[in-house]
Amino acid sequence: MPQHIKRLISVFAIFIVLFLVMRQVLKPSSFGKLGHFRADAIYENTLKPMHYTIADSCTKCHKSVRAEKDKGFHKRLKCEVCHGPGLKHSLFAEQFKGKELPDSLKLYKPGERKDCGVCHQKNAARIKIQFDTINTTMVHQIDLAEHNPPDLKANEPANCIDCHNPHQP
Ligand code: HEC
Ligand code: HEC
Ligand code: HEC
Ligand code: HEC
C-alpha cells in the first residue's frame, strides 16, 4: 500500500475514534428513548409558564364587547391579538370587578395610531389583490400619514379610536 494512503487511513481512524468518544460524552441521556428526539424536552416544555388563554375565555366576563365585535369588521380578530397575552387577567381579574385593576393584571389597550398601523398601514410587501372583489379576508390598507392625520396646529391628536370603535370599526 502506498505510504500516503496509509497516512490518510490513520488520520481517518483518529477522527472516527474521536467522533465516537465525543458522541458518547455529549449525547443527552434521554436521547433516543422516543425516537430521534431528546425525551426530556417534553417535560422541560411543560414547565414553561403559559401566557395566552383559549380564544373564548374573554367572553365569559366581557359578553358585550364580544357581541359588539362579532357584528363588525373585526369579528375574526381574537381579543389577544390586540390586548396581548391575557391568561393571568382571565384567571384573576374577576375579584376586581368595578375597581381599578392592579398593574400586573392590566392589559394593553392599543389606542395609538401605530397600533392600528401594524395591520392597516400600506405596505408594499403585502399582497396586492383588489380588496372586496377577490379576497374579502385581506386587510384594508390605508396610508397612516394621509388618512385623517392628527391636526397638530389645533393640538388635536386624532387617534384612530377617536373616530373608529376598535371593537366595531
Ligand atoms: C374572570 C373575568 C374576566 C375575564 C375572563 C377577562 N376579563 Fe377583562 N376585565 C375583567 C374585570 C373585572 C375588569 C376590570 C374593569 C371592569 O370592572 O370592567 C377587566 C378589564 C379589562 C380591560 C380594561 C382594562 C383597563 O385598563 O381599562 C380589558 C382591555 C380587558 N379586560 C380585556 C380582556 C381580555 C382581552 C380578556 C381575554 C383574554 C379578558 N379581559 C378576560 C374581568 C375579566
Ligand atoms: C382591533 C384591536 C382590538 C380587538 C380585536 C379587541 N380590542 Fe378591546 N380594545 C381595543 C382598544 C384600542 C381599546 C381602548 C378603547 C378606548 O380607550 O376607548 C379596547 C378596550 C377594551 C376594553 C375596555 C373597556 C372598553 O370597552 O373600552 C375591554 C374590556 C376590551 N377592550 C375587551 C376586549 C375583548 C373581550 C375583546 C375580544 C372579544 C377585544 N377587546 C378585542 C382594541 C381591541
Ligand atoms: C391584527 C390586525 C388588525 C389590527 C391590529 C387592527 N385591524 Fe382593523 N381590520 C383587520 C381585519 C382583518 C379587518 C377586516 C378586513 C377589512 O375589512 O379590511 C379590519 C377591518 C377594519 C376596518 C374596516 C375596513 C373596511 O373594509 O371598511 C376599519 C375601519 C378598521 N379595521 C380599523 C381599525 C382600527 C381603528 C384599528 C386600531 C384600533 C385596527 N383596525 C386594528 C385587522 C386589524
Ligand atoms: C377624523 C376621523 C378618523 C380618524 C382619526 C381615522 N379614521 Fe379611518 N376612516 C374615517 C372615515 C370617515 C372613514 C370612511 C370614509 C373613508 O373611506 O374615508 C374611514 C375609513 C377607514 C378605513 C377603511 C378604508 C377605506 O378606504 O374605506 C380604514 C381601514 C381606516 N379608516 C383605518 C383607520 C386607522 C388605522 C386610523 C388611525 C391611523 C384611522 N382610520 C383614523 C375616519 C377616521
Image (spheres, rainbow, N blue to C red):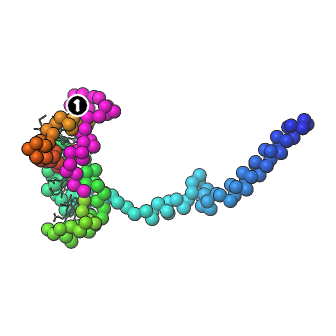
- Looking at the image, which residue sits at the far left? 154
Q: Is residue 33 left or right of residue 50?
A: right
| Residue ID at (62%, 62%) | 29
Q: Report x, y in % for residue 137.
A: 25, 37
Q: Which residue is mark 1?
A: 131
Q: Which image quarter: residue 138? A: top left
Viewer-nearest residue: 138 or 100: 100
Viewer-nearest residue: 120 or 31: 120
- Looking at the image, which residue sits at the far bottom? 95
| Residue ID at (16%, 69%) | 99
In the image, residue 36 sits, relative to residue 101, either above or below, namely above
Q: Report x, y in % for residue 154.
A: 8, 44
Where's ligand 2: which quadrant?
Answer: bottom left
Dominant SS of magenta comes to loop
Q: Is residue 85 visible?
A: yes
In the image, residue 163 sits, relative to residue 52, either above or below, namely above
Magenta region includes residue 119: yes
Kindly tell me whether mark 1's CB lies below 8 Å from ligand 3: yes
| Residue ID at (50%, 63%) | 43
Magenta region includes residue 48: no
* Secondary element at image label 1: loop
The 10 Å Cα crowd at callout 1, few under 14, some 14 to 19, many 20 or more, is few
Please state which amino acid type lies under the numbered disc 1: Phe
- Looking at the image, which residue sits at the far front? 153
Which range is magenta? Answer: 108-137
